[in-house]
Image (tube, helix red, strand yellow):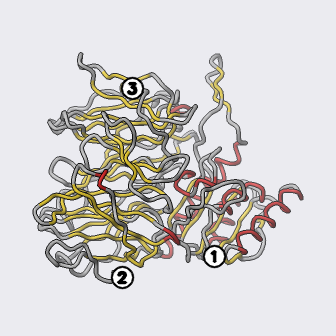
Amino acid sequence: MTRRPGTGAAAPHEGGAQTVALVVPEPGDAVPLVALQPSGARVAVVCLRPGPKGDRTALDRALGVAADRGCAVRGGAKVLGAEGDEVATALLEALRAIGPERVHTLDPDPAHTSFHQASGTPSYAVPPTHAEVAAHALAAARALQVETVRPVSVDCHREGSDPRLGAAACRRHPLPVRWLSAGFDGRLTAFLPTAAGVLRRFERVPGGAWSDPELVEGAGLLPGLLVVPDPFGLPQLFALRRTVRGDGEVDVEVVHAAQYRTGEPPTPWQSLGGPNAGDWRKGREVGFPAAAFDAAGNLFVFVRNFGHSISYRCRAADGTLTPWRHLGGTRVADDLVAVTAPHGGVEVYGRARDGAGVVRWHPGPDGEWAEDRTPPFAPRPGSLTPTAEPGAVLFRDLRTNEACVWRPGLPSPCPLGDADGAGPLAAVPGWETDGRPCTVVARVGPGGLVSVGAHPGGRPDIGVRWQDLGMSSHGAPGAAVSRTGRLTVATATPGGRLLVAQRLPHPGGFAFGAPAPV
């Protein structure tokens, strides 16, 4: 029987045995972050200030609940008591003592709640110290990773998100779902975001040993990552970059890089700017990008803008860039996903900000963008992703948590028989059985373990039979099919390592070998 999150329910599981440092201004700010830590996590809390006594009591209560569900709690909150220039040094020293594989903090660039037109000043539901401490936490995590050469992942908690819906629903910067990529030569590459940049690993020979972890250069990258295959299947990387200006204010911009040969460095990060770049106060709130290529090779990049609608920029196949353009219409949350439709154009979906549901934008008959508010589903925050069928999306139902697929023209979503997992699912095409193309779907299932299933291409209604691969996941699992048909499912583990499971080479079979650490 599926347990649905409710008041007091534990957050859905996304892996466990890692050391997590929660970095917040005061103890009360850590309470929702504690609720997200899964069984097995080793949890330490770091605060700048002691905060009110009632908040300290609330944190102690939350830590007790976490210990009851299997977390290892490292005492109460450590209060630094530092101010001004002392904060950075004190926080780095605290992280050195903890040695975290993951840092969980607040949003460095929270969304505004109102805007004063005359002064051009946004107002926020949280005090400025929330963003300041988050920025310090990001910098300290980067410094720790550079110092120790040990990967540190970072989660920034989105203000107003509901911990009962799980970690993916609360991340300001989403983890990639298509982070495992197959190159022309049959070798795979893995791309994973860390505090110091994108961590890359690749197979030295197809199906063989993997390279050591290496960083893709890029100062100021925020924790999330989007990986999109271009029309040739080559990985295109998208992220947000946060830069402190000379006057002390902050610019946040969309950046893009590409890998054209397995094993060779990706291109330098290219700035695509942002739709509100003329005003740093507005520009720093830009949502995380979504991107897709149309059939002609034109790249479309979409973001949620300051006004909570969608803006986009297009890079033509010849490299020409359009300015940022505004779609208007229904206000959306950060969750955007772009897909290549059967007609060859690009469409974009966004989760509605002010209600349950999604809005879809697609090219109209006159060539202009048309808004469709009628898609018959409401996705769980953080679960909306592209699937392998052109124009279709994959998501978890807001009410039931069941994984579903929908494409334009269907009267209702098609369920995949998975309501006991957590987070987004990864879907890849290209695997064949008995000469029939299939879509492979990977998920985090019960207990944080990775499971995998498949359905005939274009026929998710036939259903998916899930099988457990026996490996834990810290985030969404990755899947890839090489050009020779080799099917691989992988998951990241603390320290930049991977667990990799290969489909056994039995004709028509869907059995996997034991997961191997690499």
Residue pictured at 46% horizontal, 35% vertical: 358
Residue 472 x, y percent position in the rendering: 46, 74
Q: Quadrant of residue 350?
A: top left
Q: CA distance from mark 1 to mark 3?
A: 45 Å
Q: Which mark is residue 372?
A: 3
Say which amino acid is labelled 3.
Answer: Asp
Residue 501 seen in this snapshot = yes
Label whose residue precedes the other's in the sequence (1 or 3): 1
Circle 1: residue type: Arg
Q: Amino acid at mark 2?
A: Pro
Q: Are marks 1 and 3 in contact (CB under 8 Å)?
A: no
Disc 2: which residue: 517
**Picture coordinates of residue 91, whole percent (x, y):** 66, 65
Relative height, residue 373 to residue 242 (above, below): above
Compute the Cα span from label 1 to label 2: 22 Å
Q: Position of residue 24 (x, y in %)?
A: 70, 57
Quarter of the N terminus within the rendering: bottom right
Q: Which residue is mark 1?
A: 42
Rendered position, 191 above or below 173: below
